[in-house]
Amino acid sequence: MELTVYKIDGTATAKTVALNDRIFNVEPNDHAIWLDVKQYLANRRQGTHNTLERSAVSGSTRKLKRQKGTGGARAGSIKSPTIRGGATVFGPHPRDYSFKLNKKVKRLARFSAFTYKQQENKITVVEDFTFDTPRTKDYKAMLKSLKLEGEKTLLLLPDNDKNVFLSGRNLQRTNIMRALDANTYHVLNANHIIICENSLKELDKMLSE
């Protein structure tokens, strides 16, 4: 599939680029997408939550009341989970939520995500650009020219560009990253993807992973 290359002022150029069918036109695998997104979100979890069980709660071991003759159930410890201020039963403890996922599965998930965006016509290719100085106003002007103002966008750069990154980082619903760092979660989370012309060459490197 071929797409027209646009300038950042919104005007179309005479150039077109062909999207690699091995990345943008595969048979989408929803299960691979689910696994990759699950792993990404799991890896972001700190896992530092902790609760106090009976052995960790401070309190006297004296019986709360006499055990028989009250007409009610026996109460053996102030640390009981049924008492206010008592312990927590089966509560969470610090743990690592990350898990292993094969590279081929992750690659298939990314290609499936790109394919869905291509099928939805949610990909725009622009000429490589940069800003002389970091200015959020310039980035907003680019989005407005491309008729993407207010959209949740993902910009894929061929390499790190500090001025472009700083220009867009304060904008809500905007994400900027290198093409090689693109993952399934960010691709699917964006409503529209803006790809710099040379970023397509960087995406082709995913095929050799």
Image (tube, rainbow, N blue to C red):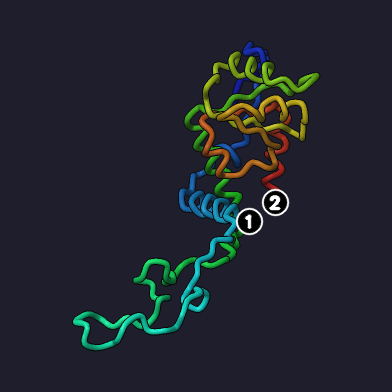
Query: Residue 96 at what x, y percent from top left?
Result: 59, 64
Rendering coords of residue 178 (x, y %): 71, 37
Q: Are marks 1 and 2 in contact (CB under 8 Å)?
A: yes
Above or below, comparing residue 199 to residue 130 in the picture: below
User: Which residue carries the number 1 mark?
Assistant: 103
Sequence-first tag of 1 and 2: 1
Whether residue 109 is situated above or below residue 134 in the rendered picture: below
Residue underneath mark 2 = 209
Considering the numbered disc 2 on the image, is that residue within a helix, a strand or a loop? loop
Residue 81 is labelled as none
- Under mark 2, the amino acid is Glu
Q: Where is residue 121 in the image (x, y as percent from the top left)?
A: 50, 27
- Front one among 147 and 4: 147
Residue for point 73% across, 30% down: 198
* Spatial separation of the CA atoms under disc 1 and disc 2: 8 Å
What's the amino acid at mark 1? Answer: Lys
Residue nearer the viewer, 107 or 82: 82
Q: In this view, does 185 lie above or below 58?
A: above
Residue drawn at (64%, 30%), measured in percent from left and top?
Answer: 155
Q: Which of 57 and 18 is in front in this view?
A: 57
Could you tell me which residue is drawn at 38 percent across and 66 percent down?
84
Q: In this view, does 13 lie to the left or right of 90?
A: right
Identify the image quadrant of residue 185.
top right
